[in-house]
Each structure stands twice: as structure tokens, then as C-alpha cells.
Image (cartoon, rainbow, N blue to C red):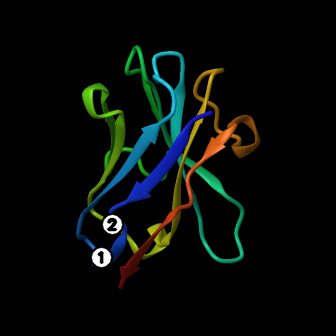
Amino acid sequence: QVQLVESGGGLVQAGGSLRLSCAASGRTLNRYAMGWFRQAPGKEREFVAGIVWSSVVTEYADSVKGRFTISRDAAKNTMYLQMNSLKFEDTAVYYCAANTIGIRTTPGQYAFWGQGTQVTVSS
């Protein structure tokens, strides 16, 4: 089992920045891929970014490319999402997730989830 806890959400003006963290416990993550997803009210949960823990290979949704950066600190067992140039449409609950099959863009292919952290971007 992997336990995931997100933090770092909040209220920010459009154009601003936030950094989300996802602290993992319970297992070493060398065999895992991890992802950030988000869910806005009335919308389906969508893929934002993913990272393979061991190789640091990354993947991004088109909507966030060039603005968001996913990274991880192996010593801290923590994954990050640096979000710059935030837009109103980035408003959502952000979740981190983990699996053992590689970066996937479908939520159903992740076995472990955090509780989510709210990001609100004011226009």
C-alpha cells in the first residue's frame, strides 16, 4: 500500500503561481509512476502530469505544457507540481495518484490516491 497526502493548494490570482506537494509513505517508489489529476465541479477527473519515479520521465496534458512542471525528491519521497501562469480554468481539486504500470492518463489505471487539495484561481 502507498499512502499519499497532498498539500499546497490555495487561492491565487490569475497569472500567479502555486506549488503542490504529494508526500508518499508506505513503500519505496522506485517501481511506481505517479500522476497529478484535477477535477473541476461538474467535470470528470482529468490527467495533468505524470512522472516515472525511477527514470524521471515526464508527461503533460497539452493544457498545462509550458506552465506546469512535475518533479520529485527521492530523498523526501515527495512529488511536486509547480504551477505558473495560472488561469481561471485551472481551478479544481488536484489529486496525486500512483501505480506500478507507468504513466497513464486514465484515472482508473491508478491504484492509489490522495485526498486532494483545492486550487482556486481568481480572474
Check the image and report above or below for 70 versus 37.
above
In what element is the residue under mark 1?
loop
Screen quadrant of the C terminus: bottom left
Q: Which residue is pictured at 47% across the width and 23% down the height? A: 29
Task: Locate residue 64 relative to residue 73 in the image: left or right.
Answer: right
Q: Which residue is pictured at 32% across the width and 35% down the height? A: 71
Q: Which residue is mark 1?
A: 14
Q: Earlier in the sequence, mark 1 or mark 2?
A: 1
Screen quadrant of the N terminus: top right
Q: Which one is in front, 119 or 77?
A: 77
Q: Which one is in front, 25 or 62?
A: 25
Q: Are circles 1 and 2 on residues that touch, CB within 8 Å? A: yes
Q: Which residue is pictured at 70% across the width and 69% down the height? A: 43
Q: Residue flagged by tag 2: what amino acid is it? A: Leu
Residue 61 is at least partly visible in this image: no
Category of crowding for the residue at label 2, using alpha-carbon neighbours closer than 10 angstroms: few (below 14), some (14–19), many (at least 20): many
- x then y, percent, for residue 68: 34, 49
Residue 100 is at least partly visible in this image: yes
Task: Locate residue 38 relative to residue 87 in the image: left or right.
Answer: right
Q: Which residue is mark 2?
A: 86
